[in-house]
Image (spheres, rainbow, N blue to C red):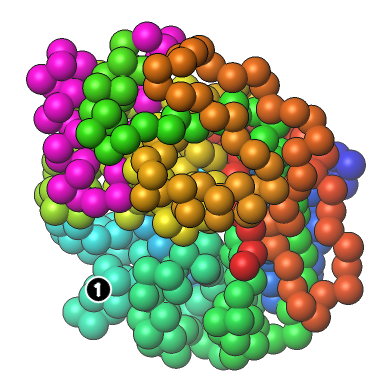
Amino acid sequence: MKFEEFRLTEPVVRAVLAEGYTRPTPIQAKAIPHVMQGRDVLGCAQTGTGKTAAFALPILHRLSHGRPRTPHGRPIRALILAPTRELAAQIGDSFHAYGRHTPLRSAVIFGGVSQHPQTRALREGVDILVATPGRLLDLMEQGFVDLRAVESLVLDEADRMLDMGFIRDIRKIVAQVPARRQTLLFSATMPADIRALADTILHEPVFVQAAAVSSTAETIQQAVYFVEKRQKPAMLAHLLRTSAIKRALVFTRTKHGADVVARHLSRAGIRAEAIHGNKSQNARVRAITQFKSDRPPVLVATDIAARGLDIDEISHVINYDLPNVPETYVHRIGRTGRAGASGRAMSFCDSSERPFLRDIERLIARTIHVIRPDGDLALPPAPRPEAAENPPCQRQDSTSPRQPGVGYRLRGRPRSRRLAVR
Ligand code: AMP
């Protein structure tokens, strides 16, 4: 299938082709026709499947054809809610790129930074607003945002928004959007609370889903090091020194742990920064920006701090501590091995963490290659091809079979994350 077949407005098609996209991804092929028709959509798709364009392109198309701007300014006609500033910024970038040949204007608002540039943009008028729920509600309460003209509402990564405790904010925001609207809800997983939310805010939705772009097992070499807790610092320094590391993301379970590890590495002469919830927003942004340019090449993070972190070319993910929630392991290691590049995921497992390893192996349905510290420190061979797949999403009431992962290649910053449903 070709993009031209959707009959999207010409300026949008031109922008898409300029991005170098040759054909729609499966989620785009399934969702775009329905969104263009104005249907509500419940989409089960992870980041990395091309889901942003799946909603952005038809929204741009519809807004280009819809009501022109009024003499009273430019009302917000599309609202996109996202859990994190990073994801909101990415979505904003996508709207900007795909809408560059249209007269439509978009803005992104999120917390943790001054609100003034955001309120200025809102005053000047935007057609499309991308926002995190907290800051949006804040600006709504201050009277800067009027949602009465919204025609399309998108909830992206809805499961993460719920995990992050945004449900009340979301309900308050949705209450301000006209009932006669199009609503699109995308989520990587479909637990009961998402289905309950979907039932209340979507109207006769079409259900579409796409499997992960490729499973982590295909592109990521995984190894686990059986070590004792006290050996972890030295082992980490050793691995960072001896592996061909471009960028390494090291995960710890606690904020304190992240600081301790980063300090230890710095003392060992390895440039490293830590990011976690106790650091200021500025320190976090600085650390991430520097990490993107390889200086330092090592970032130590807690899971919460790493949420939404979108950096390609992370060559190594190191689990300094194994997560006690097995899905977290899949999230963590999905940050490497993107775009078909080979990534490495190394995990330290001390005796107290063995049960976590068992849970992880059960979830990913494979045994992770074990390396003992006094033995061979070389990396394991590539994973065996018979590694089982986990469906990225399931819906109890869905009768549609899961789409097979076809190893679809995305341009740009493809991500391969395999999530599983408990
Ligand atoms: P997303 O899942 O929306 O975050 O998209 C993941 C990546 O895929 C982004 O870098 C997009 O630029 C890229 N992408 C989206 N649609 C396509 C397409 N049809 N062909 C190639 N790359 C795409």
Q: Residues within 10 Å of mark 1 (few under 14, many from 20)?
A: some
Q: Quadrant of residue 225?
A: top left
Q: Residue at x 29, y 59 (%)?
A: 110
**Residue 414 position in % (x across, y down):** 60, 35
Task: Tell me where residue 118 sits by quadrant.
Answer: bottom left
Q: Is residue 25 left or right of residue 97?
A: right
Which residue shows up at 64% across the image and 53% down it? 362
Near-viewer residue (105 or 159) = 159
Q: Secondary structure at mark 1?
A: helix
**Residue 275 appears left or right of 408:** left
Q: Position of residue 411 (x, y in %)?
A: 64, 30
Residue hosting label 1? 139
- Identity of the residue drawn at 15% across and 16% down: 268
Q: Residue at x 47, y 53 (%)?
A: 356
Q: Which residues are magenta?
A: 242-271
Whether residue 253 is in magenta: the answer is yes
Query: With 187 as the anchor, is 372 left or right in this view?
Result: left
Q: Percent from the top left, x then y, of residue 320?
A: 34, 37
Looking at the picture, how far across and down is residue 55, in whole percent?
64, 58
What type is the residue that disc 1 sits on?
Answer: Leu
Residue 345: in sight, yes or no?
A: no
Q: Is residue 386 visible?
A: yes
* 30 up-or-down from 234: above or below: below
Q: Quadrant of the C terminus?
A: bottom right
Q: Which quadrant would residue 63 be assigned to in this image?
A: bottom right
